[in-house]
Image (cartoon, helix red, strand yellow):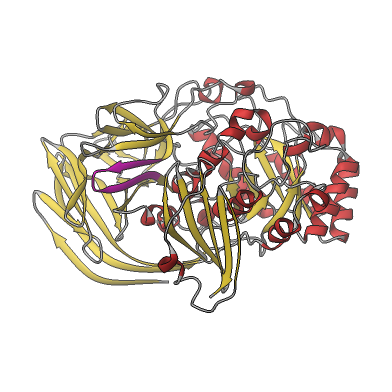
């Protein structure tokens, strides 16, 4: 639903754009022919004058420009979305267009979307007219788009890994550890930082990310260009095994993806923002009504050897006993189970109300990942043949792993997989992958992406188990704010091993496991619980995991600090779930009684579980 009110046109050296209530002010200017912008919240500068513009093969749109004026309007938008932190979104935004000319011709627009907590902008490039006719295609080689932070800002950033490194040369895969409250002026491991990026300024908080990226552009990162200066960076040349350009080929006129900036004097706007979905629109209609929910996953406990017929049958029975919707069957199922027996498993699951998600390798020629099925997702004919087989056998969806970077051909592959999967009624989860950028709204069959140091690392190393609590206090403030996060956690095993006696040791409490089921958002959750938990885990914990939702109607921030503690509330229907975790394992005292009254009115029945590192409270409003 859209409604438009008010129209303003101005012409001058600088343009002052404001959010609907006037809380945020964006000042767009030109300094020595170079476009800039600065952002203030409540009269306090949050971003200092920062560069704008694009560098293309048809013209340099970073300099030699004049600001010819702007138009703005207040727009009201409402939409529903089942797959993210809020089911119904309603907001007002100032939609503004700043027009830029070069040599007396209109060559570039910068479009702004400004709410009272977010600023987003993107570029529109026009065809170039000359004696030989119109130039209708171009190459974008880079962006001047920058973010100059105030002095005294500290950073909460995730370093971008280099290409063709790590396991089977699968990096970058957005799976590195954050540095917290660090000083500015660093550039990660030399390759910049993975979106989203969080900053603490003297006045409050800034979250940077991007939205609307598809096969028409590249996925970007954030580079530090010195001191407090941060700039949009394009992919690294070595990604995709060196195939493809780091630039974006576009047809004209074109609109680039959005650069998003969320501002707050507290962390509430950061946690609650919906901007990455606000600024995009669906690219196609859902081929059917998709459903969501919980599931089990043997691989996180049993690894590759668990992907056999008998064990997956046991996990189907486990999901049925839990009242869960699905089982995710991971790598090597094609050789360790086979297609004929997989069809039999699918029938067995359907008889018990349990569907299947199947793992696939994305490759391709961009890394050495050996796990199969391979060669099924990278080409259209093979992909559609495989998806037709899945549709025939009632498969719910796919988990596609081991992508090769953020170049334009790889972004097109993500879009092609999603588009084809929708044709066959399949939901899609991505792993070893890039960050989602408004994909919940753009692609109706998209479920979630990993793009985080997820639960598999808890199996692989005790160090990850030791750091689990701290990491859980990071993700709700950064990674999970901008898109659904497929983490695969909430185990009730004491050890990451099938016998629950050996392997890495979980250091967090059972209440902590329940809390992260609330704190980590994804509409489809494949938890790390195992069939033995029906016998060896506390009944109250198992009962909670049977009931906890994966679809939320509302999300509220209560209190917290990245890496230290997090307390949030999520609503499903008329029931609120308040969950909190702390990072050091010692009791943390916070007086939040008055805040809880908005979720649990006096006299409401509540159910609570508390341990030294976590708390969960459930009650009806």
Residue drawn at the location 49% of the way across and 33% of the way down: 406
Q: Main secondary structure of the magenta part?
A: strand
Residue 420 horizontal/vertical position (percent): 65, 48
In-front residue for pair 233/191:
191
| x then y, percent, for residue 288 | 67, 63
Q: Is residue 242 above or below residue 326?
A: above
Vertical arrangement, residue 554 with respect to residue 295, above or below: below
Q: Nearer the viewer, residue 381 or 362?
A: 362
Q: Which residues are magenta?
A: 197-209
Q: Is residue 451 left or right of residue 103?
A: right
| Residue name at image x 13 percent, y 59 percent | 10
Residue 612: where, in percent of width, then height? 56, 48
Asked whether 165 or 45 is in front, the reply is 45
Residue 382 visible in image:
no
**Which residue is painted at 62% across and 55% down in the image?**
445
Rendering quarter of residue 5: bottom left
Residue depicted at 52% across the width and 44% down the height: 586
In-image side of 139 versus 47 (left or right): right
Residue 145, position as x, y percentages in the image: 29, 38
559 horizontally vs 204: left or right? right
């Amino acid at each position: 639903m859209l409604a438009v009110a008010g129209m303003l046109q101005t012409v001058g050296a600088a343009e002052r754009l404001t959010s609907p209530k006037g809380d945020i002010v964006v000042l767009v200017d030109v300094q020595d022919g170079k476009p800039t912008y600065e952002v203030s919240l409540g009269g306090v500068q949050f971003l200092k004058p920062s560069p704008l513009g694009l560098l293309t093969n048809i013209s340099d749109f970073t300099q030699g420009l004049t600001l010819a004026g702007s138009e703005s309007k207040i727009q009201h938008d409402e939409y529903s979305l089942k797959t993210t932190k809020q089911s119904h979104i309603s907001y007002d935004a100032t939609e503004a267009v700043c027009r830029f000319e070069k040599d007396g011709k209109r060559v570039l627009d910068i479009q702004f979307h400004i709410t009272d907590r977010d600023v987003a902008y993107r570029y529109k490039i026009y065809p170039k007219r000359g004696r030989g006719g119109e130039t209708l295609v171009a190459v974008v080689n880079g962006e001047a788009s920058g973010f100059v932070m105030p002095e005294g800002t500290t950073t909460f950033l995730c370093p971008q890994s280099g290409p063709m490194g790590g396991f089977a040369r699968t990096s970058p895969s957005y799976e590195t550890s954050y540095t917290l409250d660090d000083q500015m002026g660093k550039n990660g491991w030399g390759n910049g930082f993975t979106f989203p990026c969080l900053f603490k300024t003297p006045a409050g908080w800034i979250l940077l990310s991007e939205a609307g990226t598809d096969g028409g552009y590249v996925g970007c990162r954030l580079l530090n260009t010195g001191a407090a200066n941060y700039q949009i960076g394009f992919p690294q040349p070595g990604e995709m095994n060196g195939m493809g350009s780091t630039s974006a080929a576009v047809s004209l006129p074109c609109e680039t993806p959005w650069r998003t900036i969320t501002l707050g004097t507290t962390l509430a706007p950061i946690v609650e923002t919906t901007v990455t979905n606000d600024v995009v629109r669906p690219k196609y209609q859902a081929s059917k009504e998709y459903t969501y929910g919980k599931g089990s996953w043997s691989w996180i406990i049993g690894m590759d050897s668990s992907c056999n017929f008998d064990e997956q049958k046991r996990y189907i029975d486990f999901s049925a006993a839990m009242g869960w919707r699905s089982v995710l069957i991971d790598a090597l199922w094609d050789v360790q189970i086979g297609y004929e027996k997989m069809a039999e498993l699918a029938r067995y699951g359907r008889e018990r109300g349990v569907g299947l998600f199947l793992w696939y390798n994305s490759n391709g020629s961009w890394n050495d990942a050996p796990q199969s099925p391979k060669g099924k997702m990278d080409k259209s004919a093979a992909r559609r043949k495989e998806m037709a087989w899945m549709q025939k056998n009632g498969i719910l969806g796919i988990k596609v792993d081991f992508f090769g970077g953020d170049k334009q051909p790889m972004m097109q592959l993500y879009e092609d997989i999603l588009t084809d999967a929708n044709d066959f009624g399949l939901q899609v989860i991505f792993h070893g992958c890039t960050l989602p950028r408004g994909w919940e709204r753009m692609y109706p069959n998209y479920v979630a992406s990993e793009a985080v140091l997820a639960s598999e690392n808890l199996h692989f190393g005790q160090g990850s188990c030791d750091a689990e609590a701290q990491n859980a206090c990071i993700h709700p403030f950064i990674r999970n704010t901008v898109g659904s996060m497929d983490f695969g956690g909430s185990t009730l095993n004491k050890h990451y091993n099938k016998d629950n006696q050996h392997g890495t040791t979980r250091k967090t409490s059972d209440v902590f496991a329940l809390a992260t089921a609330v704190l980590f958002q994804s509409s489809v959750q494949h938890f790390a619980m195992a069939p033995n938990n029906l016998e060896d885990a506390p009944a109250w914990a198992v009962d909670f995991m049977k009931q906890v939702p994966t679809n939320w109607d509302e999300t509220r921030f209560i209190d917290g600090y990245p890496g230290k503690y997090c307390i949030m509330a999520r609503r499903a229907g008329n029931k609120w779930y308040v969950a909190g975790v702390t990072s050091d394992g010692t009791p943390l005292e916070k007086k939040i009684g008055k805040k809880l009254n908005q979720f649990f009115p006096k006299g409401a029945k509540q159910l609570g579980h508390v341990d030294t590192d976590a708390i969960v409270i459930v009650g009806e409003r």
